[in-house]
Image: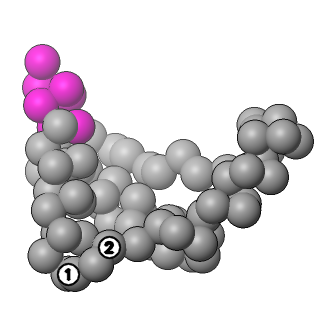
Amino acid sequence: ALWRLDMFYTAVALAIEERSGVSTSPIIGMKPLRASSGWAFCRDVHRFGFETFRKLAEAGTKLVDDATAAIEA
């Protein structure tokens, strides 16, 4: 399940980098999480996903658009 999160946000980071020319990388890690929030995250991470490829693309595009707008601002 963590693999899906990593792949999604890595793809978003690469798209942001390609569009903006700014070096990016996703920040996904378990170390900063406290024990209680870390367990809740691990318990719920299996729910990450999209019903269709279209919804996946829309979510990724929105993140890329928002990030590049913030970089350009």
Seen at 68% across and 53% down, the residue is: 41
Task: Identify the colour scheme used.
Answer: one colour
State if disc 1 and disc 2 touch (CB < 8 Å).
Answer: yes
Of residue 27 and residue 63, the one placed in the foreground of this image is 63
State how far apart marks 2 and 1 are (Cα): 7 Å
Q: Which mark is residue 23?
A: none
Read off the residue under disc 2. 50
Quadrant in which the N terminus is drawn: bottom right
Could you tell me residue 71's position as x and y percent? 20, 28
Task: Name the element at disc 2.
Answer: loop
Classified by dominant secondary structure, the portion drawn in magenta counts as: helix
Q: Which residue, given by chain and number where applicable, does mark 1 sit on?
A: 53
Residue situated in front as seen by the camera: 54 or 3: 54
State the residue at coordinates (60%, 64%).
Answer: 45
**Tag 2: residue type?**
Phe
Screen quadrant of the C terminus: top left
Q: Which residues are drawn in magenta?
A: 67-73
In this view, 21 is above or below 59: above
Disc 1 crowd rating (10 Å Cα; few below 14, some 14-19, many 20+) is few
Residue at (44% x, 50% y) in the render: 25
